[in-house]
Amino acid sequence: MAQVMIDIAGTELTAEDKQLLAHPDVNGLILFTRNFVSIEQVESLVAAARAASETPLLVAVDHEGGRVQRFRDGFSAIPAMARIAELPHDEQLAAAQDLGWLMAREVRAVGIDISFAPVLDINGCSEVIGDRAFASDVQQVAHIAQAFIEGMHEAGMGATGKHFPGHGSVAADSHFAVPVDSRSKEAIFSTDLPVFDMLADRLAGMMPAHVIYEQVDPQPAGFSHYWLQTILREQLGFNGLIFSDDLSMQGATVVGDMRQRALAALQAGCDMVLVCNDRDAAFELLQQPLPDTSARSRQRLQAMLGAANYERMDELQRSNRWQEVQRWIERISG
């Protein structure tokens, strides 16, 4: 059994969706804005997806806050992470922890296991990162991100750091281009890597960047044995689940067709590969068996699954904690 995460097109499952979700190699589902109409609808969608799957299904969403928040109606408007650093210094960590808790608890309230958060990139010249990053200073990013992660843990959600080893210093967007970071190895290791190093033991998941760090390795990080094994696993001691970024992104095309990309990512050390926004490629990938993932990889996946019983949104929003945390949104947005 391999570990593949797919997407779906609509707000209800089609027969084709159910067919894919029943495939033994598919044990992940990522949801997007197009999959959301209301809290009740997305709850039903998640339940139907779990019922269609033959294995425990990890359901995920990109719900960082700011411009990357997939669900809006009925959810709190989580501010962009860069806004936290604009608060007085003595308030930043409390705000980060509360907002991490709020984001994670609301996502869990509709039955979703994880949000792919937080962004651990150092804000440099990248427009696609920008205010998704906590700050442009290494220590500030690490401290605020740690508090945000603690809030996620408090809400019962494992955190996924992205985009290892750092996407902030390339202008190109890997969704539409093949970014190349030409900085020296020393610059990358002194500027970007320390945050991932400091937080590696607090993360349940990690997502590498579709960026080529040409002074270090000719392959994008998500297809690089050096980055994923030598640095992330061995040097940083990371023991969680490594997700590929979406293999349909332009930044992944340098490796070949979809099957070549999936095999390269798995061989480099990814535990789960994401195939989104290309249904034909997902079907093509699953026509032939993929290499079995290890028992350790399956344990990493199991560790990210949320509890079966979760506090629903209406109950959550009546709680004192939820109402108290809204003050940060009012402060930051006001």
Image: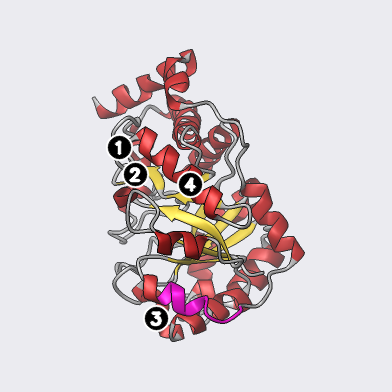
Q: Is residue 127 visible to the viewer in this orientation of the structure?
A: yes
Residue 121 location in percent, x, y? 44, 55
Question: Magenta residues?
Answer: 281-289
The percent coordinates of residue 234 (x first, y second) are 71, 66
**The N terminus: image quadrant:** bottom right
- Residue 165, position in %: x, y? 51, 64
Type of the residue with mark 2:
Gln
Labelled disc at residue 72: 1
In the image, residue 17 sits, relative to residue 293, either above or below, namely: above
Q: Is residue 219 visible?
A: no
Q: Position of residue 159 (x, y in %)?
A: 56, 46
Q: Are marks 4 and 3 in contact (CB under 8 Å)?
A: no
Place residue 181 in its image quadrant: bottom left
Q: Earlier in the sequence, mark 4 or mark 2?
A: 4
Q: Does the magenta run of residues contain 120?
A: no
Structural distance between the alpha carbons of marks 2 and 3 = 26 Å
